[in-house]
């Protein structure tokens, strides 16, 4: 069970980026909190597999209601990861299981 951060460190709405350099694939994760829920995705846009953050850990569009890829502006639903606008419309981000326990955000064991 890998600890990512304290829940209080994530604004609502807000986002953060986590690197997993010791994972076999060296993943980068996108974590988003909105309406009390926390969602996890690989930090990899389905358009070109590029990282999506505007600056490290900043994934949200100005409306705070979508994840937005910094490279070509694709918009993704926070809850489902589905692209609703942009060059990869209809594609999805790769979901990563995260959960909150005792005010701490953890990475799901199925990902490790
Ligand atoms: S790389 Fe994300 S929209 Fe093009």
Image (tube, rainbow, N blue to C red):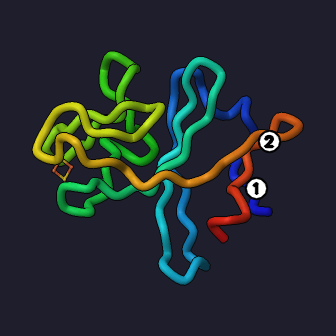
Image height of 85 relative to 96, above or below: above
Task: Give coordinates of residue 74: x percent, y percent.
Answer: 20, 39
Any atom of ligand 1 within 8 Å of the CB at mark 2? no
Q: State the mark number for residue 3.
A: 1
Task: Give coordinates of residue 34: x percent, y percent.
Answer: 55, 23
The residue furthest right is 102
Residue 34 lies left or right of residue 2; in this view the side is left
Q: Residues within 10 Å of mark 1 (few under 14, many from 20)?
A: few
Image height of 71 relative to 32, above or below: below
Residue lying at 54% horizontally and 46% vertically, measured from the top left: 40
- Residue 48 falls in image quadrant: bottom left
Q: Residues within 10 Å of mark 2 (few under 14, many from 20)?
A: some
Q: Tell me the distance, in whole angstroms, between the alpha carbons under discs 2 and 1.
A: 7 Å
| Closest to the observer, 41 or 60 | 41
Q: Which numbered disc flags the more N-terminal residue, 2 or 1?
A: 1
The residue furthest front is 90
- Residue 18 falls in image quadrant: bottom right
Q: Quadrant of the N terminus?
A: bottom right
**Tag 2 secondary structure:** strand
Task: Give coordinates of residue 66: x percent, y percent.
Answer: 35, 27
Residue lying at 47% horizontally and 62% vertically, measured from the top left: 28
**Tag 1 secondary structure:** strand
Residue lying at 49% horizontally and 75% vertically, measured from the top left: 26
The residue furthest bottom is 24
Residue beneath label 2, please?
104
Task: Give coordinates of residue 72: x percent, y percent.
Answer: 13, 44
Residue 81 lies left or right of residue 31; in this view the side is left
Labels 2 and 1 touching (C-beta < 8 A): yes
Q: Quadrant of the C terminus?
A: bottom right
Residue lying at 34% horizontally and 46% vertically, measured from the top left: 53
């Amino acid at each position: 069970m890998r600890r990512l951060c304290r829940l209080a460190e994530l604004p609502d709405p807000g986002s953060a980026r986590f690197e997993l350099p010791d994972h076999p694939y060296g993943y980068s994760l996108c974590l988003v909190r909105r309406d009390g829920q926390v969602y996890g995705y690989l930090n990899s846009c389905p358009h070109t597999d590029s990282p999506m953050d505007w600056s490290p850990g900043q994934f949200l569009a100005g409306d705070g209601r979508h994840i937005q890829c910094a490279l070509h502006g694709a918009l993704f639903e926070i809850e489902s990861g589905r692209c609703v606008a942009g060059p990869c419309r209809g594609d999805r981000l790769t979901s990563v299981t995260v959960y909150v326990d005792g005010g701490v955000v953890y990475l799901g064991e199925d990902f490790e």
